[in-house]
Amino acid sequence: MREKATVLNSDDIERIIKRISHEIIERNKGSENIIFIGIQKRGVPLAKRIKENIESLYSSEIKLGKLDISFYRDDINEKIKSDVNITEIPFEIKGKDIILVDDVLFTGRTIRAAMDAIMDFGRPKSIQLVVLIDRGHRELPIRADYVGKNLPTSLNEFVEVKLNETDNEDKVSICWI
Amino acid sequence: MDKKKDILSLDEFSVEQINEFLIQTESFAEILKRDIKKVPALRGKTIINLFFEPSTRTKVSFEIAAKRLSADLINFNTSSSSLRKGESEIDTIKTINSMENDLIIIRHSDSGYINYFAKNVPVPVVNAGDGKHEHPTQALLDLYTIYKNFTNLKDLKIAIIGDILNSRVARSDIKLFNKMGMDVKVVAPSMLMPEDFSSFKTKFANNIDEVISDADVLYMLRMQFERQERKFYPSIKEYNKFLSLDMARFNLMKKDAILMHPGPVNRGIEISGEVMDIETLNKDKIKINAQISNGVAVRMALLYYALS
């Protein structure tokens, strides 16, 4: 895999987090009814950053869950992922506005699986989707409510997201496969 | 095609794989705590539960594990099957192969039969206990139960007490615990020790009092009367005197030590009724029911692994 170009650096990511925090508050008219769920792995630190940003702006306390979607994938006969991360949603989601967070939106299949998983925990009032990068090529009728950056790609490219919490640096780049 | 993933013995797994497996099992245990205890991970997969030997807990445990992952599980009841009608074992295997299935869980009273079986079927095979030989899923759930109570497994002191000779649980446990660097001591009268005991490479004692106040884990084995062709022990009173866990001995256990038993317990033989009756009040210490619930999570992780 060869890096072609850097798309976002650490400052860019920070600005995106700040902008999306405000968009979420604007759309939901405050932070009282929202909870965050990050999709393992990199959706979790992203969700945590947005959540903490909103908390510091509005001195409120917002819940954060983690979701691993391995058990809900639809490509089971092609490949079952053998490494499974922990799912942790230790609170009631019924009636809540869930802010679902992932790093890259691509085919939409991960989000489909995540929505199925969430429904097994209860019936939320709404699910809204945050992604850092939307790279196109959707295979399902799914779109994001909050997008960090729209990044048109070709199918032989790969979007690599690195975050401090998981990879010791904040950077998004586009690579050749 | 990749090699199929049989789980016949834990000898084939490295320490790293086992550690990784313990971590992964947490994700499956989490599913069991949800309101809706079911995920679609193995939807559309067919699993056959083939028990040639009676079993309640292991069979049901696998059944729950498969269902929690949305697999279809079919119980093949051998007591009413064609084997009783004179079908040879190789023909039974052919019959099972002809039914579409993705994985077979098998228990058999002959040590080694399952290895032969696995060579002759195209799908992954999980050993649910063969004769006096191995019981890998029990060993893993025992290890997971210990892991949940002690963060560091290395040098943990384990005493395995009772009918070592007839116990496949003991064999699989001793091998696995040794592999993980734990300090294993076996406690049994000489007549309940196998002849090849030296190959276990563990310490040995005759009396539970030698280990009671020192062990981190006290693992009581079941007296397997059904496997004992002759009488191995003079009397229950004698067994009680040297090997049983009664209230007085229970109170001598270390503060953080835990008590385990693979079940079913012979009350008054391995463990006194008094001790059994205080389990709900002493969940931090008595882990016999925890072993059963952990068994479901461990078997879910194993089924998922074997089919991935």
Image: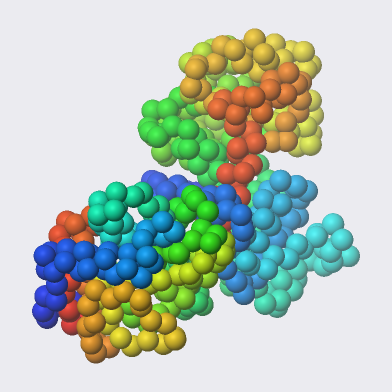
Q: Is residue A125 left or right of residue A9?
A: right
In the image, is B288 to the left or to the right of A61?
Answer: right
Along the horizontal axis of the image, is B4 left or right of A28?
A: right
Foreground of the two, A148 or B153: A148
- Residue at the spot 75% in from the left edge and 71% down from the top edge: B91
Residue B90: percent from left, percent from top: 72, 68
Tell me if B20 is positioned left or right of B5 in this view: left
- Pinpoint residue B308: horizontal percent, then vertical percent: 48, 67
Q: Residue at x 70, y 78 (%)?
A: B98
Q: Is residue A56 above or below residue B277?
A: below
* Location of the C terminus of chain A (image quadrant): bottom left
Quarter of the image where one finds residue A19: bottom left
Which residue appears at 51% of the width and 58% of the height?
A93
On the rendered image, what quadrant is the N terminus of chain A found in? bottom left
> Looking at the image, is A112 positioned above or below residue B270?
below
Judging from the image, the colouring scheme is rainbow
Question: x and y percent of residue A48 in the render?
Answer: 30, 56
Residue farthest toward the front in the current orientation of the protein: A29
Residue A82 seen in the figure: no
**Position in image of residue A29 (x %, y %):** 37, 65
Number of marks present in the image shown: 0
